[in-house]
Amino acid sequence: MAVQSYVPYRYTHDVDVAIYKADLWMLRRELESKEYVLIDNPRLDKLEFKRRSKGDIDIYTEEISGIRVEHLIQRARQALVLGRTAKVISPEDLLLLKCSAGRERDLADAAALLVRLYNQLDWDYLNKSTKNLGIDLRGFLIRSLDRIPLSVDNPPKIRKLLRKLLEEKL
């Protein structure tokens, strides 16, 4: 849903939430009152709220792909999500998490984010974080350029511009 708050190009049925562990009880009380069931998933180091007729809600209280939850929350921004104001992950941290996951839809999400936000991103932060996390963000983002949304005017021109930008910035 964070991608959708920055670039409304696709919808998702699940939600990922980073929350302080001390606040988990409030979220649990609210979701259980709406018939969600809490499941611990130690293999993926997360909690999952499941409900038969709704999408899943994945809860992270410690870290996500090597980034501490406290850090993600501190850098979060206010955004409009489904008509409501909410805190969402920063676009830089979102790109880092998409790179860490590396799935096909993550490449497409990264391309959409780049097209919309490339001139607003904190490239110094991305460079520093890439080194700390040991990920190839540059390679991931260059691969993502093949997934620029069809709604973009002149994708070859945008792809060329973004490739040059990535080579300069990362």
Image (cartoon, helix red, strand yellow):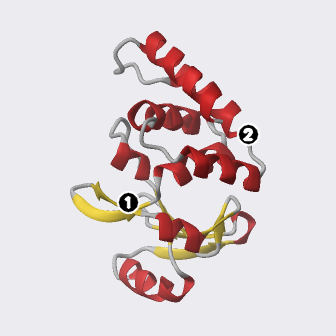
Task: Judge whether 8 appears above or below 94 on screen.
Answer: above
**Does the image show residue 47?**
no
Quarter of the picture containing the C terminus is: top right
Q: Residue furthest left?
A: 83
Task: Judge whether 109 appears above or below 92 on screen.
Answer: above
Q: Residue 101 carries which label?
A: none
Judge the density around disc 2: few (<14), some (14-19), many (≥20) Cα neighbours within 10 Å. some
Relative side of 70 to 140, left or right:
left
Task: Judge whether 24 appears above or below 121 on screen.
Answer: below
Q: In which quarter of the image is residue 140?
A: top right
The x, y position of residue 14, in whole percent, is 45, 55
The residue type indicated by label 2 comes to Asp
Q: Quadrant of residue 166?
A: top right
The residue type indicated by label 1 comes to Ser
Name the residue located 38 percent from the left edge and 11 percent from the top edge: 154
Name the residue located 55 percent from the left edge and 36 percent from the top edge: 105
Q: Mark 1 points at which residue?
A: 53
Task: Judge whether 77 appears above or below 116 on screen.
Answer: below
In 3D space, how far apart are the residues under numbered discs 2 and 1 (Cα atoms)? Answer: 38 Å
Q: Name the residue under label 2.
A: 136
**Does the image show residue 159?**
yes
Name the residue located 48 percent from the left edge and 34 percent from the top edge: 114
Relative side of 30 to 73, left or right:
left
The x, y position of residue 45, in whole percent, is 69, 69
